[in-house]
Image (cartoon, rainbow, N blue to C red):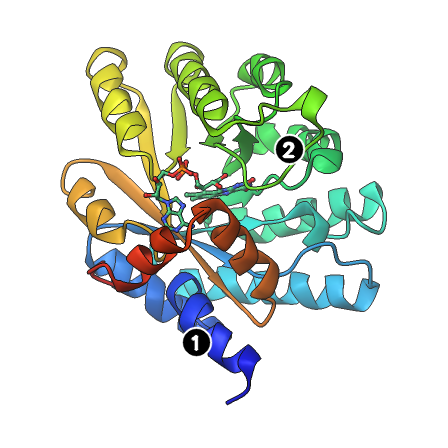
Amino acid sequence: MDMGDILEHIFAGRWIAGTKLNDAIKSAQQFNAQGMKAIINYLGEEISDQHQVDQTMDMYVRVIRYIKNYNIKADISVKPTQLGLSITEAEALSNYSKLLKEARSSSVFVWLDMEGEHTVDSTIKMYLSEVQGGLTGICMQAYLKRTESDMQKLAKYGAIIRLVKGAYSASKSKSFTSHSEVTKNYAKLMQMEFEQFTEFTLATHDIEMIRKAQKLNETYKRKLTFAMLKGIRNGFAKELARDNRVSIYVPFGEQWVSYSYRRLKEAGHIKLVLKSLFENQGV
Ligand SMILES: Cc1cc2nc3c(=O)[nH]c(=O)nc-3n(C[C@H](O)[C@H](O)[C@H](O)COP(=O)(O)OP(=O)(O)OC[C@H]3O[C@@H](n4cnc5c(N)ncnc54)[C@H](O)[C@@H]3O)c2cc1C
């Protein structure tokens, strides 16, 4: 076992279902058995090779067919730069549309992940090109100052938003940089979701935010789902799923390095990482 294998085993093994589609399906079935839905993501990003984009498309089509054939309760979540955004916007638009055609015929919901700041305009454009056909949602990041106005715009189209704090870094002038500012903006945008959206997902492990949202929903009664990442607070997620809709993001594939790096970075402190590795999380 070389250093790469060891790191993969320690970190990726907790956060990632495995390298094969079967691993993701097995993990999704385990979460389903605990009353939770899965959000399956095939790892990969910033793909600038056409052949690799085509392979990624083929894989997502396989994922959709597996979900349908094995009767799995799962959405899929794709990164625009997996669908060709690093080649041309037209390529990404066309692939997203093809994917939705396949997904809609199998009643599978498709999420657009939100990546770095430079991809936000194109990702929103992609989403708006398909929002009317339904069965699709978009991730919005609280760390970006522009998100509030993006959400105002998206509200007019009946968008389905998955609100996150944000896993990327952006220029200081365009983003909230401290953790407390990001959390404050998350709370503000969450309030806006209750007021202006009927269906949405709050993707966070922040228990204070989750409790606030539960309280708000006693008044607003929205179609609210909580979502967490595989390997982080999944024991809590299982408890939450007793009385709430809960989904777990389940990534799989060989390209685990960037994803695991972001998880490490946001944990911010090795103690947190170790805690998440050894916590009894049920799956
Ligand atoms: C379903 C889902 C989809 C996502 N999709 C996107 C996306 O498309 N684009 C994007 O930019 N980001 C995405 N993210 C990541 C998100 O932006 C945050 O980086 C991540 O969720 C951590 O923020 P938090 O809201 O949990 O709050 P934090 O305040 O960061 O964390 C709250 C608590 O959760 C625990 N925790 C959080 N992260 C870790 C960790 N890595 N290890 C151990 N404990 C941890 C800690 O106890 C921490 O105190 C997604 C997150 C989820 C849950």
Q: Which mark is residue 127?
A: 2
Observer-nearest of 180 and 117: 180
Residue 180 is labelled as none
- Say above or below: 2 vs 221: below
Left or right of 252 in this view: 235? left
Residue 175, x across and y down, in percent = 63, 24
Q: Quadrant of the C terminus?
A: bottom left
Labels 2, 1: front one: 1
Task: Give coordinates of residue 108: x percent, y percent.
Answer: 46, 49
Residue at 49% x, 21% y is: 181
Residue 162, compared with residue 229, is above or below; it is: above
Q: For residue 172, what is the image quadrant?
A: top right
Q: Earlier in the sequence, mark 2 or mark 1?
A: 1
Callout 2–callout 1 Cβ contact below 8 Å: no
Write the residue at 21% across / 46% down.
236
Residue nearest the viewer, comparing 158 with 152: 152
**Mark 2 is on which residue type?**
Tyr
Q: Within 10 angstroms of label 2, few (less than 14), some, or many (20 or more) residues?
A: many
Ligand 1's quadrant: top left
**Visible in this render: residue 191?**
yes
> Is 98 situated above or below 118?
below
* Residue 71 visible, this orientation: no
> CA–CA distance between discs 2 and 1?
35 Å
Q: Which residue is mark 1?
A: 9
Comparing 170 with 151, the one in front is 170
120 left or right, relative to 219:
right
